[in-house]
C-alpha cells in the first residue's frame, strides 16, 4: 500500500509518449520499431520524432530539406502533420483516462492531470493499470508521474521516461524525503515545469543547477529575483500544491485559424477562398465552445525572406452584435480583406482571429436581428452534417473547391479514425 497520508492531495500526470509519431504508428504495424518523424505545415521542419528517430540523432525543429537525405539513408519514415487524426486520438486518450479519476484537467493534446487524492490503492500498481488500459484501448504508449503537487507529478513523469527500470510509472509520494531528494539531485533544473532556456541560465548563474538546489532555495530571494510564479514553483517542489485542478476550462480570449500557403498566392480570388475557409473554421471552433465573437481580425503577409519588400497588414472590425454564425463572420472577414489586398504581392500566409469572446448563454437577440435564432439553427444543422459525414461536406461557396492555396502535405497519412473513405482495408 502507498504510504500517502489520506489528507494530502495527490496528482498524476498522464502523458502519451512521442504522441504525433505514436499516432502514425498505430495504424502502421510495419513501422512499430522504425524511426518516424512528423513534419510541420508545408512539410517544413521536424516537429515530432519517435524514440528510434531520437536515438539516431534526428534533430527537432531542423528544416526537413537539410536532413531528408540522411533520414532516408537510416530508414526514417516521414509523415506530414495529420491534425484530424491527432485530435481524434487525443479525444480517445482523454476519454480513456477520465474513468480513472473523478477529476481530470486536460493540459495539452497529449497530457492531462488526474486527481488521485484519497484513492486507497498501491498507486504504482494503479499507474500501471492506467498505462496498460490506455495502451490496450488506444494503442498509445504513455507514462504516469505521481506527486503531492502538479509540479512534482510532472517531474515524476519526466523521471519515469528517463528511467527504464520504472516501466513508465513513477510515484514520488511513496518515497521518503531523503529518497526524493536523492532523485531531485540528479535532475537538471531545466526539467522543472515552466523553466525555459533563459530562466535556466539565470538559475544556474545563482548555483541552482539541479532540482534539489532549487527546492531548497530561499523563497523570499526567489520571489524578489524571479517573481511569484517561480516562488510557487519552489513551494510545489516542496509538496505544497498551489494550483488546483481546473474542473472548468477558462473562457478562451481568442480563436484563430491560420495556415501558411502550400504555394505563393497572388490573386484576390485565392485569398478570398483562404480567408473564407479560415473564417468558417474559426466560427465552427467558437460554436464547439458555446462562445460568440464580438470582433473579427484578418491578417495577410508575404514571406519576410522574399526578395520583394515585406508586406504584412492586420485589420479589425467590431461586429454589430456578438455572433458565431459562419456567414456573418465570413462577410466581415472578406470586407476587411478587400481593404487590405495589394496586387503584385506574393502572399505566403493569411488568417482570421475572432476576439472579444462572450458566452453563448445569456446573449439576447439584437433589435435589428443581426444575431437571429434562424442563423443559429442553420449553423447547428451544418455542424451536425459535417460531424456525421466528413469535415466540409457542407461549406460556404466562397471557400472554393480546388483550393490550390492549401497547405502542402505530401506525406500525409489517411485520416483513419475520422473519414469513412479512409478506413483501413484488410485484404
Image: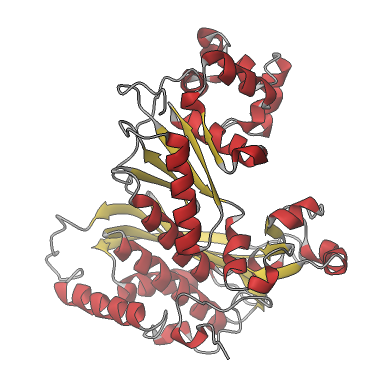
Q: Say which of 275 and 232 sits in front.
A: 232
Return the x and y of residue 352 as percentages of the image width and height.
46, 64
Quarter of the C terminus within the rendering: bottom right
207 to 400, vertically: above or below: above
> Total marks drawn?
0
Instruction: Identify which residue is drawn at 35% across, 32% down.
Output: 244
Q: Residue at x 60, y 38 (%)?
A: 166
Q: What colour-coding does the image apply?
A: secondary structure
Q: In terms of depth relative to the viewer, which is nearer, 224 or 105?
A: 105
What's the residue at 55%, 33% (across, down)? 156
Residue 152: in sight, yes or no?
yes
Q: Nearer the viewer, residue 116 or 342?
A: 116
Q: Left or right: where does residue 11 sit relative to residue 349?
A: left
In the rendered image, which quarter contains the N terminus? top left
User: Is 154 on the left or on the right of 362, as rendered?
Assistant: right
Residue 346 visible in this rendered orientation of the protein: no
Residue 159 locus on image (x, y percent):
61, 34
Q: Position of residue 52 (x, y in %)?
A: 74, 56
Which residue is at a point 11% across and 66% down the rendered structure image?
Answer: 367
State which quadrant residue 201 falls in: top right
Q: Position of residue 47 (x, y in %)?
A: 67, 57
Can you say whether 195 is above or below 139 in the image? above
Toward the front, the furthest residue is: 1
- Which of the two residues, 12 or 189, is positioned nearer the viewer here? 12
Q: Is residue 63 above or below residue 120?
A: below
Amino acid at each position: 500500500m502507498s504510504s500517502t497520508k489520506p489528507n494530502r492531495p495527490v496528482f498524476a500526470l498522464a502523458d502519451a509518449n512521442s504522441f504525433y509519431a505514436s499516432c502514425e504508428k498505430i495504424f502502421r504495424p510495419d513501422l512499430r520499431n522504425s524511426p518516424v518523424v512528423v513534419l510541420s505545415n508545408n512539410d517544413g521542419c521536424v516537429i515530432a520524432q519517435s524514440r528510434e528517430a531520437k536515438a539516431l540523432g534526428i534533430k527537432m525543429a531542423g528544416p526537413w530539406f537539410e536532413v531528408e537525405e540522411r533520414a532516408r539513408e537510416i530508414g526514417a519514415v516521414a509523415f506530414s502533420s495529420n491534425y484530424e487524426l491527432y485530435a481524434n486520438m487525443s479525444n480517445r486518450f482523454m476519454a480513456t483516462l477520465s474513468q480513472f479519476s473523478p477529476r481530470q484537467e486536460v493540459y495539452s493534446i497529449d497530457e492531462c492531470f488526474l486527481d488521485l487524492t484519497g484513492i486507497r490503492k498501491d498507486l504504482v500498481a494503479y499507474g500501471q493499470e492506467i498505462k496498460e488500459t490506455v495502451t490496450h484501448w488506444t494503442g498509445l504508449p504513455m507514462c504516469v508521474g505521481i506527486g503531492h503537487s502538479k509540479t512534482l507529478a510532472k517531474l515524476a513523469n519526466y523521471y519515469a521516461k528517463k528511467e527504464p527500470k520504472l516501466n513508465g510509472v513513477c510515484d514520488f509520494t511513496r518515497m521518503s524525503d531523503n529518497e526524493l531528494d536523492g532523485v531531485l539531485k540528479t535532475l537538471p533544473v531545466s526539467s522543472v515545469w515552466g523553466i525555459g532556456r533563459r530562466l535556466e541560465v539565470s538559475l544556474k548563474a545563482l548555483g541552482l543547477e539541479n532540482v534539489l538546489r532549487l527546492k531548497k532555495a530561499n523563497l523570499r530571494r526567489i520571489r524578489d529575483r524571479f517573481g511569484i510564479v517561480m516562488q510557487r514553483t519552489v513551494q510545489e517542489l516542496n509538496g505544497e500544491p498551489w494550483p488546483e485542478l481546473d474542473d472548468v476550462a477558462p473562457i478562451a480570449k481568442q480563436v484563430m485559424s491560420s495556415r501558411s500557403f502550400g504555394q505563393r498566392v497572388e490573386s484576390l480570388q485565392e485569398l478570398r477562398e483562404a480567408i473564407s475557409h479560415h473564417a468558417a473554421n474559426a466560427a465552427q471552433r467558437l460554436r464547439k465552445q458555446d462562445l460568440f465573437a464580438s470582433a473579427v481580425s484578418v491578417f495577410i503577409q508575404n514571406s519576410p525572406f522574399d526578395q520583394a519588400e515585406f508586406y504584412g497588414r492586420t485589420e479589425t472590425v467590431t461586429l454589430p452584435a456578438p455572433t458565431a454564425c459562419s456567414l456573418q463572420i465570413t462577410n466581415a472577414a472578406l470586407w476587411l480583406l478587400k481593404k487590405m489586398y495589394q496586387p503584385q504581392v506574393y502572399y505566403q500566409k493569411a488568417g482570421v482571429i475572432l476576439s472579444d469572446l462572450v458566452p453563448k448563454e445569456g446573449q439576447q437577440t439584437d433589435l435589428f436581428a443581426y444575431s437571429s435564432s434562424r442563423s443559429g439553427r442553420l449553423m447547428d444543422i451544418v455542424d451536425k452534417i459535417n460531424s456525421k459525414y466528413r469535415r466540409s461536406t457542407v461549406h460556404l461557396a466562397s471557400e472554393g473547391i480546388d483550393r490550390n492555396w492549401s497547405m502542402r502535405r505530401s506525406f500525409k497519412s489517411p485520416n483513419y479514425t475520422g473519414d469513412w473513405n479512409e478506413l483501413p482495408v484488410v485484404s
